[in-house]
Image (cartoon, grey):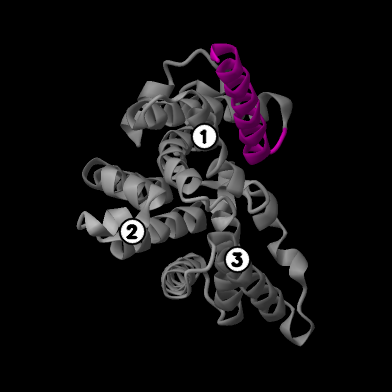
């Protein structure tokens, strides 16, 4: 982290001065890791028509945190991660076996997860308010250890994209054709869903459950308006996510707003701009 702090010290901002405001420097590094993660996953979330999948995962993660708190765990994060991964695998299994539409299966799991989470958190007359911070999030509370963990996940997701992008895309567009070409659609979908589950769970306390879904939809949706092929699609999603992520952090610092909400509004503006540019090009 000393190398990172040394680089940030060169920036022309008051919070970047040497020996001060390490929470902002950590938050900036977190944005540089989180934004590409969400941007990559966003392309496949849009292609698989799973726009509300992250909401459902967030609900299951909330349930995991409630279970961890009920068990007296000091840190419920890993309990939430485990439950989210189980949730993602069950979702994949039910979707493949039942052949139901994604939104139907997501609705079933989402409603079940949030009801179970509220039930557990209010068990014995407990108060739900202690979990209110999860709704908005606070990226300034991010720790270097969590950033390092997400950096490892980013590398793993990037490797998955490099070697399996064609298979993921084909399974999203035409699953039957993908299977006939030897693509193991079930395994790829399970890996993809688990990757989304882990990323959503680890970042929800920083971004907030209320807006985390937008980070998994807007970068890919905006890039789809302008990208002519998968390479452009992915690159535009990455660039849009990074620019809006950094911009949102700066806006939240100087205006005093929620970072997650600020990033979301910039992503929404990028989406509408890309939509207008698409219409102009036509």
Which residue range is magenta in the image? 257-282
* Lateral position of residue 79 relative to residue 272, left or right: left
Q: Mark 2 near mark 1, Cβ–Cβ under 8 Å?
A: no
Which residue occupies 56% across, 19% down? Answer: 278
Disc on the earlier residue, 2 or 1? 2
Between marks 1 and 3, how big is the CA–CA gap? 24 Å
Along the viewing direction, whichever of 175 and 142 lies nearer the viewer: 175
Farthest residue, direction bottom: 124
* Residue 20 image point, x, y percent: 52, 29
Q: Quadrant of residue 264?
A: top right
Instruction: Specify whether residue 228 is painted magenta.
Output: no
The rendered magenta stretch, by its main secondary structure, is classed as helix
Which residue occupies 33% across, 58% down? Answer: 176
* Residue 94 image point, x, y percent: 47, 74
Q: Is residue 74 visible?
A: yes
Q: Which mark is residue 176?
A: 2
Q: Is residue 257 above or below residue 201?
A: above
Q: Is residue 75 above or below residue 134?
A: below
* Lateral position of residue 238 relative to residue 118, left or right: left
């Amino acid at each position: 982290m000393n190398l990172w702090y040394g680089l940030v010290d060169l920036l022309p901002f008051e919070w970047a001065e040497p020996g001060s405001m390490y929470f902002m420097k950590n938050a900036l590094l977190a944005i540089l890791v989180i934004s590409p993660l969400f941007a990559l996953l966003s392309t496949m979330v849009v292609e698989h028509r799973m726009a509300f999948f992250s909401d459902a995962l967030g609900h299951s993660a909330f349930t995991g945190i409630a279970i961890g708190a009920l068990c007296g765990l000091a840190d419920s994060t890993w309990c939430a991660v485990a439950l989210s991964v189980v949730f993602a695998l069950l979702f994949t299994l039910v979707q493949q076996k039942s052949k139901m539409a994604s939104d139907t299966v997501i609705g079933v799991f989402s409603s079940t997860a949030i009801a179970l989470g509220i039930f557990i958190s209010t068990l014995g007359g407990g108060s739900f308010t202690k979990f209110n911070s999860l709704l908005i999030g606070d990226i300034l509370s991010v720790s270097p250890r969590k950033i390092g963990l997400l950096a490892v996940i980013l590398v793993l997701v990037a490797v998955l994209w490099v070697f399996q992008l064609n298979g993921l895309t084909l399974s999203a567009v035409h699953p039957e054709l993908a299977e006939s070409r030897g693509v193991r659609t079930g395994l790829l979908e399970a890996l993809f869903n688990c990757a989304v589950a882990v990323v959503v769970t680890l970042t929800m306390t920083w971004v907030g459950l209320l807006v985390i879904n937008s980070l998994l939809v807007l970068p890919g949706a905006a890039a789809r308006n302008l990208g002519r092929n998968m390479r452009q699609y992915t690159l535009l999603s990455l660039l849009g996510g990074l620019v809006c992520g950094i911009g949102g952090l700066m806006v939240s610092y100087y205006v005093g707003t929620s970072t997650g909400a600020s990033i979301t509004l910039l992503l929404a503006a990028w989406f509408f701009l890309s939509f207008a540019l698409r219409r102009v090009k036509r």
